[in-house]
């Protein structure tokens, strides 16, 4: 081939290569779309599988909780409420609403969480609620349902609005202050499990007397009321047996003091009145110091400040009922209390060592300042914008 023919052939080949676009060896957009389709198919398959499992559990109403020996069992199965799906479903209103004026503490109003910064988050399917606890690390909330004819429920809600039912049809439910453990009554058993992420893991169960019910966590132990209509409590360490103990005088326990002892309400020897007492959990709740004087309500509502100095507790009877502020440094003979505000319901949230918030018996949010109360000033009501009259307010505790 002559040189000029060879040059012409090379030019023709190059021009053809330029004219015909070569396919890319990698297509990022196509890969992303294909990956999304694969993920969607996997999620769909997983959702169908979970739905099938949930359908079986709901239709039979039976879940395996362990062998009843108290030994650690298999991871707990999520219990489904026949009237509500136990499957996690994203909230259509998961995006937070524009901020409005906030509150002293986070509150749940109906099925809407309202933060101290005014940000609102809807949690559809949650409620009516009795208590709300922050999950470890602030990743969400554990919501304890109010008692209904079908029992109580326990929901876990994440910060994106995702809600899942963990328990349904249970008896009394208590959550550890750090949100890492849950205990509840179910049928003839007392159960406990650890909270790992958004699941209950490592279930233990023991048989208990018909009247026994969990009251609160004390460290890793569960305080159990032996007689709901009388005095007497015992401590149960999950994994062990529940003893009847020797305590027959404790009516209520309001909280834990900085040294690990408890503050409670006890009956006097003649059972004519009640007193406040420091209880030693290492000696079967033996009272080590008592203080009598104020007329205390027996509804069990009360809360101790983090430094262990102050107690807010309900006192009086009938129309004279009110919240009282007690200086625990003066616990002893001739103990006195200062009227603080309207009667309390539910949990008390101490935001500082001298400031507390609670919901009164009219369903209103109330803020207490120790210095103001000691100066003779009543607790202040706090408005919660955007709350309907039918919305029940519940404080978020941690």
Image (cartoon, helix red, strand yellow):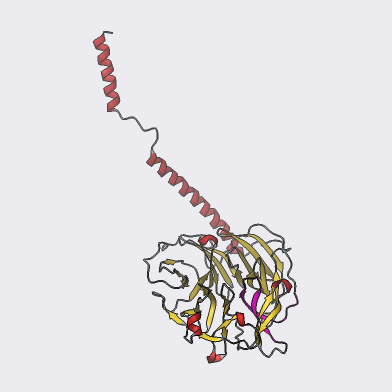
Residue 21: in magenta span: no
Q: Position of residue 353 (x, y in %)?
A: 53, 74
User: What residue is shown at x 70% (from left), y 88% (from top)?
Assistant: 271
Q: Is residue 50 visible to us here?
A: yes
| Picture quadrant of residue 80 | bottom right
Q: Is residue 212 visible to us here?
A: no
User: What residue is shown at x 43% (from left), y 46% (from top)?
Assistant: 36
Q: Position of residue 148 (x, y in %)?
A: 56, 75
Q: Nearer the viewer, residue 267 or 72?
A: 267
Q: Nearer the viewer, residue 120 or 341?
A: 341
Quadrant of the image containing the N terminus: top left
Q: Which residues are magenta?
A: 244-269
User: What residue is shown at x 50% (from left), y 48% (from top)?
Assistant: 42
Q: Position of residue 178 (x, y in %)?
A: 58, 65
The image shows residue 163, relative to residue 227, as above or below, that is above
Q: Nearer the viewer, residue 71 or 139?
A: 139
């Amino acid at each position: 081939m002559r040189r000029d023919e060879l040059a012409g052939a090379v030019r023709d080949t190059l021009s053809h290569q330029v004219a015909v676009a070569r396919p890319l060896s990698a297509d990022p957009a196509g890969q992303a779309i294909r990956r999304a389709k694969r993920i969607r198919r996997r999620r769909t398959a997983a959702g169908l599988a979970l739905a099938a499992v949930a359908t079986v559990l709901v239709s039979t109403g039976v879940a395996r909780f362990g062998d009843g020996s108290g030994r650690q069992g298999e991871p707990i199965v999520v219990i489904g409420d026949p009237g509500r799906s136990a499957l996690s479903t994203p909230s259509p209103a998961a995006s937070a609403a524009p901020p409005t004026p906030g509150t002293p503490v986070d509150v749940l109003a109906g099925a809407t969480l309202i933060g101290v910064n005014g940000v609102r988050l809807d949690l559809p399917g949650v409620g009516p609620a009795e208590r709300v606890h922050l999950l470890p690390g602030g990743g969400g909330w554990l919501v304890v349902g109010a008692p209904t004819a079908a029992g109580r429920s326990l929901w876990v809600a994440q910060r994106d609005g995702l809600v899942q039912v963990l328990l349904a049809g249970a008896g009394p439910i208590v959550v550890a202050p750090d949100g890492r453990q849950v205990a509840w009554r179910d049928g003839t058993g007392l159960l406990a499990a650890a909270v790992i992420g958004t699941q209950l893991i490592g279930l233990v169960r023991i048989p208990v007397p018909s009247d026994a019910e969990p009251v609160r966590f004390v460290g890793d132990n569960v305080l159990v009321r032996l007689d709901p209509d009388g005095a007497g409590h015992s401590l149960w360490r999950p994994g062990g047996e529940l003893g009847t103990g020797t305590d027959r005088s404790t009516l209520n326990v309001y909280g834990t003091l900085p040294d690990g002892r408890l503050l409670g309400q006890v009956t006097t020897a003649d059972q004519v009145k009640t007193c406040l007492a420091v209880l030693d959990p290492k000696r079967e709740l033996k009272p080590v110091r008592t203080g009598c004087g104020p007329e205390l309500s027996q509804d069990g509502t009360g809360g101790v400040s983090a430094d262990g100095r102050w107690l807010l507790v309900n006192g009086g009877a009938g129309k004279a009922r009110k919240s009282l502020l007690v200086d625990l440094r003066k616990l002893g003979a001739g103990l006195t209390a200062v009227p603080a505000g309207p009667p309390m319901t539910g949990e008390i949230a101490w935001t500082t060592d001298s400031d507390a918030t609670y919901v009164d018996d009219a369903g209103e949010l109330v803020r207490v300042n120790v210095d103001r109360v000691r100066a003779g000033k009543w607790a202040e009501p706090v408005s919660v914008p955007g709350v309907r009259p039918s919305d029940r307010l519940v404080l978020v505790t941690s």
